Image (cartoon, grey):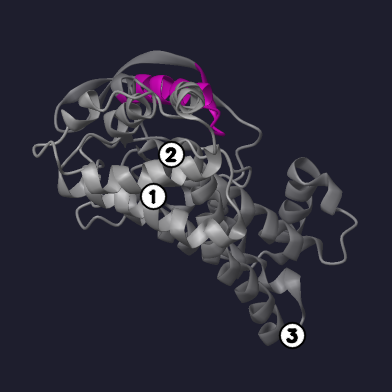
Amino acid sequence: FSRGGDGKAAVGPMLREVLLGEAMHARGIPTTRALAVVATGEPVYRELPLPGAVLTRVAASHIRVGTFEFFASRGDLERLRKLAEYTIARHDRELVTAPQPFLALLQAVAERQAALIAQWMNVGFIHGVMNTDNMAISGETIDFGPCAFVEAYDPDTVFSSIDHRGRYAFGNQPDIALWNLARLAETLLPLLADDPEKAVAMATEVLAAFPAQYRGHLLRGQRAKLGLRRGEPDDDGADATLAGDWLNLLHAERVDFTLGWRRLADAAAGDEAPLSALFADARAPETWLARWRARCASEDGSTEHGSAIIGIERAMAMRRVNPAVIP
């Protein structure tokens, strides 16, 4: 019943969740799944009357950050503790005997979210409404709602019609994930330590680690998308810059995010024409491509004939992580 709404759903958005949920699942991105969509026969009133529906969703669990907020906002510490204990038993059973199980739970949730959001960003997925009730403790994509995939690459892309200020824009998703985790941390403070200051310090340490966790997951995904088979810690800064400059190039030239990555795989196989055709200025990617080829060559170290074979193998690997089609 957020936004003064009626809590009801229409057939169209529910079918969209089926399609996008299956797309996420096929790409190996943790997600809830749609078991069924059933028409209710009742009209749902939005801008126009729409046919109503009920979505049956399956998940590892339906526990969200908002579930913890529900009890914390009422000061119900007993049920909050039971919820936290149940969550650990269901999702992180190995933490039951941890010295600080509730702190360890917060760390586990943060790690799962860092990995999940990085996967979203690497396929161009815009959740649309990343409020705390739409963040699953299990680390699964949930409550897709008004979601989409980025087309022309722009970090400021917004899809939800209610997101008037761009709070949930594509590029904001890592920061919103951290904001949501901070709300989860607030609910757990009474369980972390009797001393409020100590509890805050413990939670703050977990939250402070999140940006680096996210960047690590993002870079691992970007390396795969770039066709890089390995990366040493000393390469992290250079590889992150290489990936960032590629995204800046896509943004400046308004290149389609999905096709840009997919055509880069063609370039790895020796055919740069499909990639160049995506740019208004066909020569725009030349300087960056030279840097990328040099980075790839640093892993190859072979003859010209061998490099051609490696290029084909690299392209095949890139196509496995750079989808050709988005819903």
- Magenta span: 13-35
Q: Amino acid at mark 1?
A: Ala
In the image, what residue occupies the spot 53% across and 53% down?
66
Give the answer, above or below, for where 241 lies relative to 281.
below
Give the image location of residue 314, x and y in percent.
48, 28
Give the image location of residue 92, x and y in percent.
77, 47
- Residue 20 painted magenta: yes
Does 196 sit left or right of 186 as displayed?
right
In the image, what residue occupies the spot 69% across and 54% down?
108
Q: Of the residues under marks 1 and 2, which one precedes in the sequence?
A: 2
Depth check: 264 or 52 in front?
A: 264
Depth check: 286 or 83 in front?
A: 286
Residue with the mark numbered 3? 195
Q: How many numbered marks does the figure carry?
A: 3
Residue with the mark numbered 2? 226
Residue with the mark numbered 1? 243
